[in-house]
């Protein structure tokens, strides 16, 4: 009798069909003609990356003049200059790049989770397919990516990273084992340089969960060593990026209070909606206070109702609880770890206040983002429970369960996502033309600010003005705060001496006939007053004491040559923190050592195949 477990053609065909449905379903969101507001940030970063690469090659882009009249770039936790998406962006159109990367992330997540379940945890094909499909169709990573938060898509790479780390444990050939560890380390480093620095805590917790599950099943402490070495090498390669991001973010203060739930009952109610049922569009009545509007990409984790259904069936079979003290101990650690993630969502816990002091979390006001690692955990535990369920017609049950995942996703109200895809002023960014033939035309000649009729900073914080050789004063850069509270005092000293009236289409209007009258002020970056030039020296964000930033962050008149380089997208000299210099060398040395190790492995393996 043909079954999914013994017929590869049928099984692979089903797996491919599921993946195709996923791609059609989610990529269609990028074809509607309007986008989430955050897409402009991602687009402008990648376009700047292309300009920088064409002018400077792989030189570190520490700063960018294209927004905020000068801002850190390499130190931006979300920047992705040394990443696959930036590489593809050099050759492909913007939307094509985003679609290709989404396809790659999705495929790696689907394949990686399946390999973990099938080859690491030794589950059946049916169970592995169910677990990997749950992981593939989760909303949180997909919706964030489709909203312009492209770093969140990196979660899909975690399974393949862990799989390569885990199989190194089983290799009798130590050289091949080291090759696998260094390969997974490079994957981890790529994640950090692709925007993963922003979500490093969530990534590490996810890896921790996978390591615990492996330890519980095989009782082999070496998994901790092998995964730790891989993560450590990856962190060392990325040390320069991570420290730069931390030193930048740590120096900023945002007036956004963390979100905490009022009670455990409200949290449980919201939790079930987040993960298993229909996501809410608002949680204002469930939390103590909320400083900014949350949209659906933050509120839908969606692993579907299937994990609950499988759990109920699993319990009906009266599973025998183990008396193995080792497994009980580490299962308890896993339970406590999940409990800790839950406690982070309550303001009256001491743990919540301690965790808020961890780098990168201090600037993250959405506490339930730390629940994201539960997506991987639920996917794997569901597959494990299904593997224990015994039914005569297991293939039919498998297809039925897979249908539940797909049907629940098809029944999702797409308007919930369409409602936040209301930013239509991305035409210039999507249709930009930067190439080697015109690269010299790109520089910053003017600074620009846009105010409403009451002279308030309510104008569009667009990022496309750099394509017209202008850098806007009030850019949309969330690390500065949603009201730009950390940016406003810094850019306040800039001088604007030319006034124009523009009729601008409002940011979130689909009515092309509506225009808004705005006051536009322009200035000369080289305008000199009180010994200062008229542009922000972004090195002041990172090391103000040693870069002559005592009074303000403006370039000094004596730094005119450095400003000229900067405005032409060229690197300029500045003084780095001593620790930053140490981490720069540490990253470079580790990276070179890793590449040499891989090169020697290939050379030796060519002479003496495994």
Image: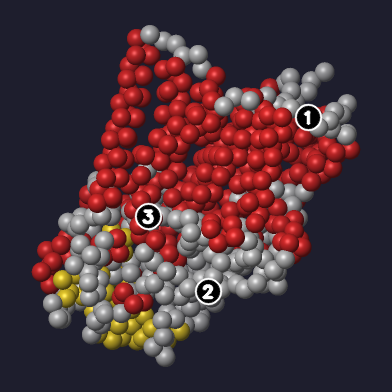
Q: Is residue 191 visible?
A: yes
Sequence-earlier tag: 1 or 2: 1
Residue at position x 51%, y 49% from top?
Answer: 201
Between disc 3 and disc 2, the foreground one is 3
Q: Quadrant of residue 266?
A: bottom right
Quick one: 145 or 537, which is closer to the camera?
537
Quick one: 288 or 419, which is closer to the camera?
288
Sequence-earlier tag: 3 or 1: 3
Placement of the N terminus among the 4 image quadrants: top right
Sequence-earlier tag: 3 or 2: 3
Mark 3: few/some/many CA within 10 Å (<14, 14-19, 20+): many
* Residue topped by disc 1: 322
Query: Height in image: 375 above or below 576?
Result: above
Q: Horizontally, is 494 left or right of 16 in the view? A: left
Between disc 1 and disc 2, the foreground one is 1
* Residue topped by disc 3: 245
In the rendered image, residue 510, in percent from the top left (x then y), is placed at 55, 73
Question: Element at badge 1?
Answer: loop
* Residue topped by disc 2: 508
In the rendered image, residue 470, in percent from the top left (x then y), is placed at 28, 70
In the rendered image, residue 481, in percent from the top left (x then y), is placed at 45, 70
Q: Are marks 1 and 2 in contact (CB under 8 Å)?
A: no
What is the distance, in whole Å, between disc 3 and disc 1 at their CAs? 45 Å
């Amino acid at each position: 009798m043909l079954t999914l477990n013994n017929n590869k053609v049928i099984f692979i065909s089903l797996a491919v069909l599921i993946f195709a449905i996923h791609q059609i379903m989610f990529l269609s969101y990028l074809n509607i003609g309007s986008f989430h507001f955050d897409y402009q940030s991602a687009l402008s970063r990648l376009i700047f990356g292309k300009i920088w690469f064409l002018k400077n090659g792989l030189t570190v882009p520490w700063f960018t003049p294209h927004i905020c009249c000068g801002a850190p770039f390499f130190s931006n936790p979300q920047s992705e200059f040394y990443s696959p998406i930036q590489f593809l962006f050099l050759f492909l159109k913007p939307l094509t790049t985003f679609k290709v990367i989404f396809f790659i992330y999705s495929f790696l997540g689907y394949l990686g989770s399946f390999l973990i379940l099938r080859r690491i945890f030794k589950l059946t094909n049916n169970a592995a397919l169910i677990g990997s499909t749950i992981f593939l169709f989760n909303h949180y990573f997909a919706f964030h990516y489709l909203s312009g938060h492209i770093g969140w898509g990196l979660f899909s790479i975690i399974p393949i990273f862990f799989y390569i780390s885990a199989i190194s444990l089983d290799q009798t050939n130590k050289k091949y084992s080291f090759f696998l560890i260094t390969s997974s380390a490079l994957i981890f480093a790529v994640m950090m340089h692709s925007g993963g620095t922003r979500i490093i805590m969530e990534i590490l917790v996810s890896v921790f969960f996978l390591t615990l599950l492996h330890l519980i099943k095989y009782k082999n402490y070496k998994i901790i060593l092998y995964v730790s070495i891989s993560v450590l090498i990856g962190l060392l390669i990325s040390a320069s990026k991570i420290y730069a991001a931390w030193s930048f973010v740590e120096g900023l203060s945002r007036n956004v209070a963390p979100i905490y739930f009022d009670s455990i009952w409200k949290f449980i109610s919201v939790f079930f909606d987040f993960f298993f049922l229909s996501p809410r569009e608002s949680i204002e009545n469930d939390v103590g206070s909320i400083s900014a509007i949350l949209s659906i990409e933050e509120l839908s984790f969606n692993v579907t109702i299937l994990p609950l259904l499988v759990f109920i069936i699993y319990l009906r079979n009266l599973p025998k609880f183990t008396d193995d003290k080792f497994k009980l101990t580490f299962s308890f650690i896993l339970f406590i770890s999940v409990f800790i993630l839950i406690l982070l969502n309550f303001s009256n816990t001491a743990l919540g206040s301690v965790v808020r002091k961890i780098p990168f979390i201090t600037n993250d006001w959405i506490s339930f983002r730390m629940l994201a690692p539960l997506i991987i955990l639920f996917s794997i535990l569901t597959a494990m429970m299904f593997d224990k369920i015994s039914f005569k017609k297991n293939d039919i049950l498998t297809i039925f369960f897979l249908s539940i995942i797909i049907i629940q996703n098809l029944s999702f109200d797409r308007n919930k996502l369409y409602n936040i895809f209301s930013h239509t002023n991305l035409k210039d960014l999507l249709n930009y033309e930067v190439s080697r033939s015109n690269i010299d035309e790109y520089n910053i000649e003017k600074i620009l600010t846009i105010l409403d009729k009451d002279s308030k900073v309510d104008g569009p914080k667009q990022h496309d003005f750099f394509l017209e050789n202008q850098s806007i004063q009030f850019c949309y850069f969330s690390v500065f705060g949603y009201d730009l509270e950390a940016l406003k005092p810094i850019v306040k000293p800039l001088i604007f001496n030319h006034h124009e009236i523009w009729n601008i289409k409002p940011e979130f209007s689909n009515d092309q006939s509506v225009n808004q009258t705005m006051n536009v002020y322009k200035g000369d970056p080289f305008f000199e007053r009180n010994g200062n030039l008229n542009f922000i020296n972004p090195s002041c964000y990172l090391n103000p004491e040693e870069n002559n930033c005592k009074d303000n962050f403006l370039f000094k008149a004596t730094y005119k040559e450095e400003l000229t380089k900067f405005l032409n997208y060229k690197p300029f000299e500045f003084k780095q923190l001593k620790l930053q210099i140490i981490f720069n060398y540490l990253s470079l040395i580790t990276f070179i050592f890793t590449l040499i190790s891989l090169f020697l492995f290939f050379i030796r393996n060519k002479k003496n195949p495994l």
